[in-house]
Amino acid sequence: MISAELFLGAKASREKNSIPGSRSDEQLGRLMGFQFAPLIHRMVDKHGWREKDAKACFEDLKRFFYLSSVSERSIIPSKKIDEMWHNWILFTKDYAMFCQSYFGRFIHHKPRLRSDPPVGSGCSIKETLQLARQTFGQLSENWSFPNKAINEAASCSCSSWCQCS
């Protein structure tokens, strides 16, 4: 299982709600206004997604990034959101510019390795979904996880920030 890792440098430089600009609603509104048609086209052309599904998943990916930027806990993407993220990373310059512009830093995608320490506390899918529901209300099917995974801790090791390895 993977999660968002915000590359922050010194631990002391981290601040909750650190998206540039003012707080919450304005930050989220600015983020949600961002569009990137080449990614939508890639999901349609290369992966056979319907355009409306690709657009909806991109909206959820931005919500996922927002949660990872404001939460002190790890959050875990669903398979569908993760697939969108994998494809966006391929647009390296655009992705890096987006991260810098909206978060002031690069958002790394880092899967758990076999050699990583065992699962720590606070890294569950249930917590991700709870935070997402508290923040956004009802969630789309893009946030769906297999039932078995929801009842187990995710296979990532976590620190107090959104860092999974």
Image (spheres, rainbow, N blue to C red):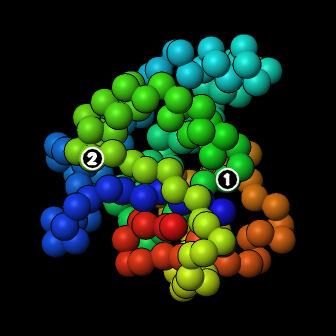
**In the image: residue 9, left or right of residue 53:** left
Q: Amino acid at mark 2?
A: Arg
The earlier-in-sequence mark between 2 and 1 is 1
**In the image: residue 1, left or right of residue 98:** right
Query: Which label lies toward us, 2 or 1?
Result: 2
Q: Amino acid at mark 1?
A: Ser
Q: Is residue 120 above or below residue 114?
A: below
* Quadrant where the image shows the N terminus: bottom right
CA gap between label 2 and label 1 equals 23 Å
Residue pointed to by mark 1: 78
Query: Where is residue 50 shown, x and y percent of the image?
Result: 76, 20
Query: Where is residue 56 shown, x and y percent of the image?
Result: 62, 31
Q: Are marks 2 and 1 in contact (CB under 8 Å)?
A: no
Crowd band around label 2 with a 10 angstrom C-alpha radius: few (<14), some (14–19), many (20+): some
Whether residue 45 can be seen here = yes
Query: Where is residue 85 shown, x and y percent of the image?
Result: 56, 40
| Label drawn at residue 113 | none
Q: Is residue 106 above or below residue 31?
A: below
Q: Residue at x 66, y 40 (%)?
A: 83
Whether residue 34 can be seen here = no
Residue farthest front in this picture: 115
Query: Where is residue 20 shown, x and y percent of the image?
Result: 19, 44
Residue pointed to by mark 2: 105
